[in-house]
Image (spheres, rainbow, N blue to C red):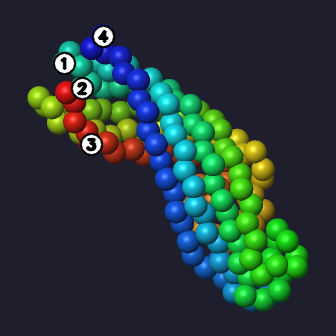
C-alpha cells in the first residue's frame, strides 16, 4: 500500500517564563510542562511510497501541568499559596497538507494545517501577558500548524 501511512507522533512541551506584574501582587511566572501523542493517517500522491504531496487527519491527546507562581500574595488557583498548579487534558483533531521527499532511506518534508483542541479545564483566564507560545499550548481552540519532518525508512 504505497500511498497510505499511519503516523504516531509523541510530543513534549516545556515553557517557562515571567509574566510580569499585570494582575499580580508581585512578579508572576508561569510554567507549562507535559506532553501527549498524535495518531493519524496520511495519503501520499507519489509513486515511490512516502513521497510527493500528502494530506491527512490526526487525533491529538495531551496532558499538561500549568504552574503559577506569584512573588506577592495573590496567586489565582489557591489564594493562600504563593505557588499553585493545575493539571489539564486536551483532546482534538488536526488536518495537514504538505510535501515529502523520500530517497532510498532518508525522508524530509514539511506541512501546514489546522488543529482544534478542547481543554478538560479552561486555563486561559490566567494567560494574560503569557505570550504566544504559552497561549498556543494552553489555550485550546482552533490553531494553525506548521510541521517539519526528517526520518528514515526501512
Residue at the image point whose x is 66% and y is 44% from the top? 90
Q: Secondary structure at mark 2?
A: loop
Instruction: Name the outermost residue toward the left.
Output: 104
Residue occupied by mark 1: 48
Q: Is residue 23 visible?
A: no
Element under disc 3: strand
- Give the crowd class for mark 1: few <14, some 14-19, many >=20 residues within 10 Å: some
Callout 2–callout 4 Cβ contact below 8 Å: no
Where residue 147 sits in the image (x, y, percent)? Answer: 39, 44
Q: Is residue 54 left or right of residue 79?
A: left
Q: At 82% from the left edge and 68% from the top edge, which residue is drawn?
A: 77
Q: Residues within 10 Å of mark 2 (few under 14, many from 20)?
A: many
Q: Which image quadrant for residue 44?
A: top left
Q: Is residue 147 left or right of residue 120?
A: left
| Mark identifier at residue 150 | 3
Q: Please state which of residues 97 and 16 is positioned toward the viewer in this rendering.
A: 16
The quadrant holding residue 99 is top left
Q: Identify the secondary structure beneath mark 1.
A: loop
State if disc 2 and disc 3 touch (CB < 8 Å). no
The image quadrant where one finds the N terminus is top left
Secondary element at image label 4: loop
How far apart are the two marked residues, 1 and 2, measured between alpha carbons? 6 Å
The x, y position of residue 150, in whole percent, is 26, 42
Mark 2 or mark 4: whose residue is earlier in sequence: 4
Query: Residue at label 2?
Result: 51
Left or right, 41 with respect to 30, comes to left
3D distance between C-alphas at marks 2 and 4: 13 Å
Residue 60, placed above or below residue 127: above
Amino acid at each position: 500500500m504505497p500511498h497510505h501511512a499511519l503516523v504516531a507522533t509523541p510530543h513534549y512541551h516545556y515553557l517557562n517564563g515571567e509574566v510580569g506584574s499585570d494582575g499580580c501582587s508581585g512578579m508572576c511566572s508561569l510554567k507549562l510542562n507535559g506532553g501527549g501523542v498524535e495518531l493519524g493517517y496520511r495519503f501520499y500522491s507519489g509513486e515511490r511510497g512516502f513521497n510527493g504531496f500528502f494530506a491527512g487527519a490526526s487525533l491529538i491527546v495531551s496532558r499538561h501541568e500549568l504552574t503559577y507562581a506569584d512573588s506577592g500574595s495573590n496567586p489565582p488557583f489557591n489564594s493562600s499559596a504563593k505557588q499553585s498548579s493545575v493539571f489539564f487534558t486536551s483532546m482534538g483533531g488536526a488536518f495537514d497538507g504538505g510535501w515529502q521527499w523520500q530517497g532510498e532511506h532518508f525522508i524530509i518534508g514539511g506541512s501546514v494545517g489546522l488543529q482544534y483542541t478542547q481543554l478538560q479545564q479552561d486555563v486561559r483566564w490566567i494567560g494574560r501577558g503569557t505570550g504566544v507560545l504559552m497561549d498556543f499550548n494552553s489555550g485550546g481552540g482552533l490553531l494553525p500548524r506548521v510541521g517539519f519532518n526528517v526520518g528514515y525508512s526501512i
